[in-house]
Image (tube, rainbow, N blue to C red):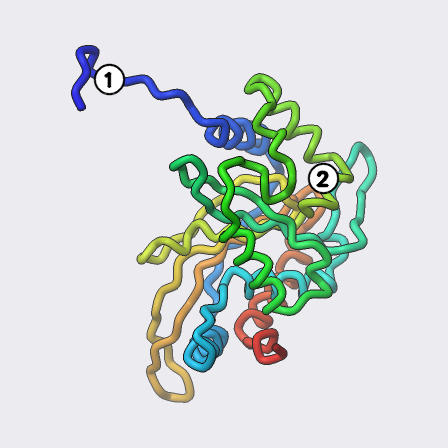
Amino acid sequence: MTTKKGYKSVSLSFNRRAVIASATVTKDKNAIHCFTEVDITVPRDLIKKHFEKTGEKLSLTAYIVTCLSNVIKDYPRFNSFTKGRKLILLDDITISVLIEREIAGENVPEPIGIKKAQDKTYLQIHKEIREAKNQQTDKLGSLSGQTWISLIPSFLLRLFIRIADKNIYMAKKYGKIAVTAVGMYSKEPIWFIPHGTATVLITVGSIEKKVIELDNQFISREHLCLTVSFDHDIVDGAPASRFMNQLIETIKSGQLIQTD
């Protein structure tokens, strides 16, 4: 549609204003990023066999969350955040998962907190995420019972995000470990450099098929592009590297799917 002015003005939704505020607050965060590819042929094959047997399509994101919670148990310092001159270490592992839902005709990312993730199986986490995605609602924040968040004036959003980042109640509700799967919608190899307040943030990229040499044979394997970001105020390079080694091996093995 052509207008006389040659343009049209559309009000930014609360979601867009919240993203802008969050990016502004977190852009100066002292983060270090790791880019890697993980061979997910085994877990993907197990997911496929489960679908052929039961007709249920299991979530790869839920599998990454399960593997992450399993490894974080061995790195309790990673499940923490700074508050003033103190380090607050959380007892339970709550993982924030960003999911996309349609609200009022707009695709909106909204976080849900997978609480006590260390005690849950892959199938339990899968069902929790799937139920949240399928929830019918027209209000942002309904997944966590915080629809009031959309009432915050724009000029207070940045202040709210700064306060929430250091709030123990919010940390217990949403966690300081996060997973977002924005890159899975791409058909080409792709990584994202995210922003966020999490101490450990996994950004799931796309899946690509690669031909590799194994046992003197060339075979096709599926690889998942991952970006893992760490709060450098808490996590140094050496422990981050050891963490990545364990996380990659856990994901590759598919053992947490076999357990179920």
Instruction: Find residue 156 and report its image quarter.
Output: top right
Looking at the picture, which amino acid does disc 1 mark?
Tyr
Residue in the foreground of this view, choosing between 15 and 128: 128
**Residue count near mark 2 (Cα–Cα under 10 Å), binned few <14, some 14–19, many ≥20:** few
Q: Residues within 10 Å of mark 1 (few under 14, many from 20)?
A: few
- For residue 40, side relative to residue 197 (left or right): left
Which is more N-terminal, label 1 or label 2? 1
Q: Answer whether residue 239 is visible to the viewer in this image.
A: yes
> 204 and 33: which one is in front?
204
**Residue 252 at x, y percent in the picture:** 53, 73
Q: Is 78 left, or right, of 45 in this rendering?
A: right
Q: Secondary structure at mark 2?
A: helix
In the picture shown, does residue 144 fall above or below 179? above
Residue type at mark 2: give it. Answer: Met
According to the picture, the residue beneath numbered tag 1 turns out to be: 7
Quadrant (top left, top right, bottom left, bottom right) of the N terminus: top left
Q: Is 30 above or below relative to 216?
A: above
Q: Kindly report the distance in space between the C-alpha atoms of the residues bearing marks 2 and 1.
A: 41 Å
Instruction: Residue at 58%, 37% (x, y): give it.
Output: 141
**Residue under pointer 2:** 170
- Residue 99 appears left or right of 230: left
**Residue 5 placed where, x, y %?**
21, 11
Q: Position of residue 134 (x, y in %)?
A: 49, 53
The dot on residue 229 is: none
Name the residue located 47 percent from the left edge and 78 percent from the top edge: 54
Q: Residue furthest bottom?
A: 216
Q: What quarter of the picture does the C terminus occupy?
A: bottom right
Image-based side of 207 in relation to 8, left or right: right
Task: Look at 53% across and 29% down and name the residue there.
Answer: 18
